[in-house]
Amino acid sequence: MASFLVLTPRPDNGGRNEDKTVFIRDGFAFLALLLPFVWLLFHRLWFEAAMVLAAGVAISAVGSYTGHDGAAGLIGFLVSLLVGLEANHWRAAALERSGFELAGVVDAHNASDAETIWFLGTERFRPVLPAKNPVPTPDTPGFAATPRPAPLGGMVGLVSHRGEN
């Protein structure tokens, strides 16, 4: 089962409009690995696309100039791999900058099931609650050192969207 990030417009940015709710799969974007620049442009991630293009040109130029074309190809693949791992996170971050907020995380088999689970309000989603209380420290009265529970499901990217601190 995959996790889907649910992003909704902020209440101060036009209110809760269910037609504008966006579901983004939290995981590896295979198409972003194959065509990173095109994928980023398609999702209107202009800055990220410019950086990937600049990195690709610089890697190719340095590889050609120094005669290390094989190493340049490997480094180019690693940049594409990074884009594949982080593409959906960058897309969610861009939406948050443009007036959306992370409303929850839904575990579902596909995007259609995630929408059904979210809009019907079944118990298979976890709302993301803002951390109102600071993290307790050993100096905090009543502090008990308890282990944190393991996160539900897996994570492919470098950043978790499960609402944990």
Image (cartoon, rainbow, N blue to C red):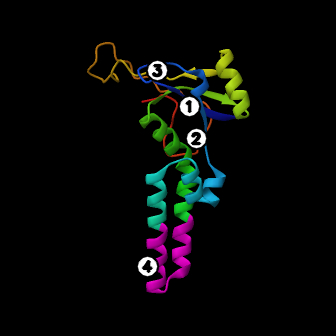
SS at badge 1: loop
Q: Which residue in the structure is indicated by mark 1?
A: 151
Q: Distance of mark 3 from mark 2, alpha carbons? A: 19 Å
Secondary element type, mark 3: loop
Decide: is 144 above or below 88: above
Front: mark 4 or 3: 4
The mark lying in front, picked from 3 and 1, is 3
Say if mark 2 contacts mark 1, CB within 8 Å: yes
Please name whichever residue, 151 or 58, is drawn nearer the observer in this view of the structure: 58
Q: Is residue 2 above or below residue 57?
A: above
Which image quadrant: the N terminus? top right
- The local crowd at label 4, few if under 14, some if 14 to 19, many if 20 or more residues have their Cα within 10 Å, is few
The first of marks 3 and 2 along the sequence is 3
- The residue mark sitting in front, 1 or 4, is 4
Where in the figure is residue 44, as x and y percent of width and height? 52, 48
Q: Which residues are magenta?
A: 56-77
Sequence-wise, which precedes: disc 3 or disc 1?
3
User: Mark 3 highlights which residue?
Assistant: 129
